[in-house]
Image: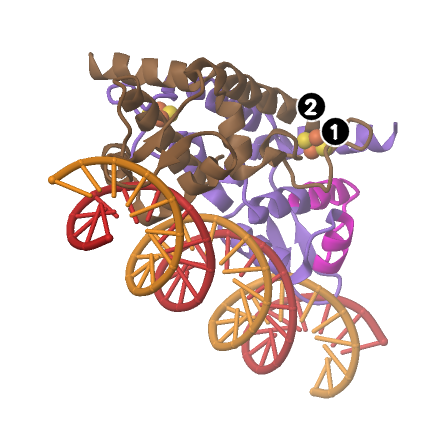
Chain colours: A brown, B purple, C red, D orange
Amino acid sequence: MFSKACEYGIRALTIIAKEGEKGQKVGIKDVCKLADTPESFTAKILQDLVRKGILNSQKGPSGGFYITKDLSEVALYDIVVAIDGPEVFRKCGLGLAECNAAKPCALHTKFEVVRNELNAMCQTSTLETLVEQLVLDIHN
Amino acid sequence: MFSKACEYGIRALTIIAKEGEKGQKVGIKDVCKLADTPESFTAKILQDLVRKGILNSQKGPSGGFYITKDLSEVALYDIVVAIDGPEVFRKCGLGLAECNAAKPCALHTKFEVVRNELNAMCQTSTLETLVEQLVLDIHN
DNA sequence: CAAATATAAGACAAATTTGTCTTTAATTAA
DNA sequence: TTAATTAAAGACAAATTTGTCTTATATTTG
Ligand code: FES
Ligand code: FES
């Protein structure tokens, strides 16, 4: 569904968002410890997301990663597109060059339903809702 | 969503099923021409599916691939599991070691909806319905 | 300013997926 | 029975994804 890079990115961002609510920047080591993701690989992903404006970083002592945007404004959709690109939301389920109703594959009608659900999940989830879920889960 | 191998396998099987309804075995070259898949790679995938009992093959002149099962009995689900394994129907959307409601990831509730739709699509699609769609599409 | 700390960047490496090619084995038909 | 045909098997290769490591750069704090 999502690439490993995307899974790690989402988990790392959720951790950064959660810690950020306490007003703290989070160093890459802490992020990866809490998100349980490989450190160097995750660092590379986060650097890319910084370049793309999804989150911010600061070098030096007491530096780390943090998010200035309103968490409710960062949709999961944006994160996925930033890391994996928009293809997952558009491409044909059977790998045809393009997905369109004019020249559909044998699975098109049913696949569109699945893809629409995926899209809805990503549009309606934000860093805010993800952090909420994390916190809820911990309290169970 | 599915691997390339899986996409090719589904498309090849659909072609073989469709041609098979005319009572014909289909050689690997024709399969790949009609399905627009790479020949050697597709051959390998089909050989694996033969070993797993999804379809049949015959060597020698006038040989090729064919399906003895009732097309309505071959669910897309079985094909996907044969090629990609059952993980896609079970695994956590954020890549946690296991997906369960007891220790859910931040996306669990919403992701289950998507995965259930995917599952439903694969359970309710069969080689019969796929061939039907192909034929319908051609006649439009 | 100097030393310590933390991200940035990019080369490098491993693993997996995707794809090709050659040789072998089976089957058919003349 | 022989030649032609076709799938089977497996070695090999390319591309992509995943992951590590080293060096550079920026920032803070004393
Ligand atoms: S054409 Fe295949 S999903 Fe639309
Ligand atoms: S735990 Fe992540 S989807 Fe269920």
In the rendered structure, does residue B137 fall within the stretch colored magenta?
Answer: no
Q: CA distance from mark 2 to mark 1?
A: 9 Å
Task: Respond whether the residues carrying marks 2 and 1 are from the same subunit.
Answer: no
At horizontal 58% and vertical 33% (from top left) the residue drawn is A88
Residue on which the image places disc 1 = B133
Q: Residues within 10 Å of mark 1 (few under 14, many from 20)?
A: some
Q: Please say if the residues under marks 2 and 1 sit with CB atoms less than 8 Å apart.
A: yes
Q: Position of residue A83 (x, y in %)?
A: 50, 37
Q: Secondary structure at mark 1?
A: helix
Q: Position of residue D25 (x, y in %)?
A: 40, 52
Report in which chain the residue with disc 1 lies.
B
Residue B90 horizontal side relative to residue A138, left or right: right
Amino acid carrying label 1: it is Gln
User: Magenta part of the protein: which range?
Assistant: B13-34
Q: Residues within 10 Å of mark 2 (few under 14, many from 20)?
A: few
At horizontal 41% and vertical 22% (from top left) the residue drawn is A68
Which picture quadrant has residue C2?
A: bottom left
Q: Position of residue A76 (x, y in %)?
A: 48, 23
Check mark 1 vs ligand 1: CB closer than 8 Å? yes or no. Answer: no
Q: Main secondary structure of the magenta part?
A: helix
